[in-house]
Image: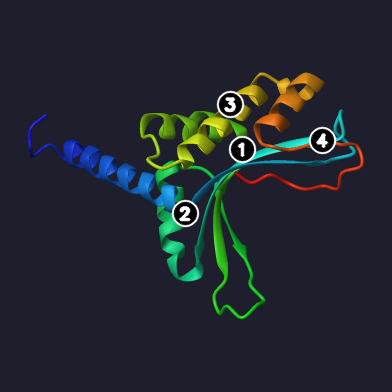
Amino acid sequence: MSENDPSADNQQGRLEFASWIIGFVDGEGCFSVSIFRNRTSKFGWQVMPEFVITQSERDLDVLKDIKAFFGCGNIFVNRRYDNHKRNLYRFCVRKRSDLTNVIIPFFNQYPLLTKKHLDFITFKKVVNMMNKKQHFQTKGLNKIAKLVGKNLERNQEPSETIR
């Protein structure tokens, strides 16, 4: 490619933005796996992985740019009723096919630089287990729970483990 090729500029810009996203997610992102009671599920528990970035209302445009970059996910408002004047917004990817085909490949290609990379590794393992439907088997559900540090006792109240 020549230096004047517009696609070369676009690739360079995408690479720079990808590098920026890595730093941003290292500081502001979260790979979470929630496990909570659900009476309608086979074993009484539901597993929900999600990738989240939270920002205040004043930085909503950043979340919109990230959503456009990934081409998936949603932005939700978390209205605040405390002494803070601005609401929080969450960019959230929950759809397993988007996690599998977009989010995980991105962070495989552009690894995180902090210990959050370990959270990503656990998150990736859980999503891969779910893709193999292991969360529908007692052994698989227990293995997922152990990976995320959750104790699945029968009397336990619904809660979640955030990584």
Quadrant holding the C terminus = top right
**What residue is shown with label 2?**
28
Give 155 or 62, whichever is nearer the viewer. 155
**What residue is shown with label 1?**
95
Residue at 66%, 36% (x, y): give it: 148
Residue at 87%, 34% (x, y): give it: 44
Helix or strand or loop: what does disc 2 sit on?
Answer: helix
Q: Can residue 137 be seen in this view?
A: no
Q: For the residue marked with disc 2, what is the amino acid?
A: Glu
Image position of 111 (left or right of 150)? left
Q: Distance between the residues labelled 4 and 3?
A: 19 Å
Q: For the residue marked with disc 4, what is the amino acid?
A: Leu
The percent coordinates of residue 26 (x first, y second) are 42, 47
Q: Which is nearer the N-term, disc 4 or disc 3?
A: 3
Q: How far apart are marks 4 and 1 (CA)?
A: 24 Å
The percent coordinates of residue 80 (x first, y second) are 63, 72
Helix or strand or loop: what does disc 4 sit on?
Answer: loop
Q: For the residue marked with disc 1, what is the amino acid?
A: Lys
The percent coordinates of residue 146 (x first, y second) are 70, 30
Q: Distance between the residues labelled 4 and 2?
A: 29 Å
Helix or strand or loop: what does disc 1 sit on?
Answer: loop
Residue at 72%, 32% (x, y): give it: 145
**What residue is shown with label 3?**
125
Q: How far apart are marks 2 and 3 (CA)?
A: 22 Å
Q: Which is nearer the N-term, disc 1 or disc 2?
A: 2
Q: Nearer the viewer, mark 1 or mark 2?
A: 2
Give 43 or 65, whichever is nearer the viewer. 43
Q: Which is nearer the N-term, disc 4 or disc 1?
A: 1
The crowding category of the residue bearing disc 1, from other C-alpha atoms within 10 Å (few below 14, some 14 to 19, many at least 20), is some
Query: Residue furthest toward the left?
Result: 3
Give 155 or 42, whichever is nearer the viewer. 155
The percent coordinates of residue 98 (x first, y second) are 54, 35
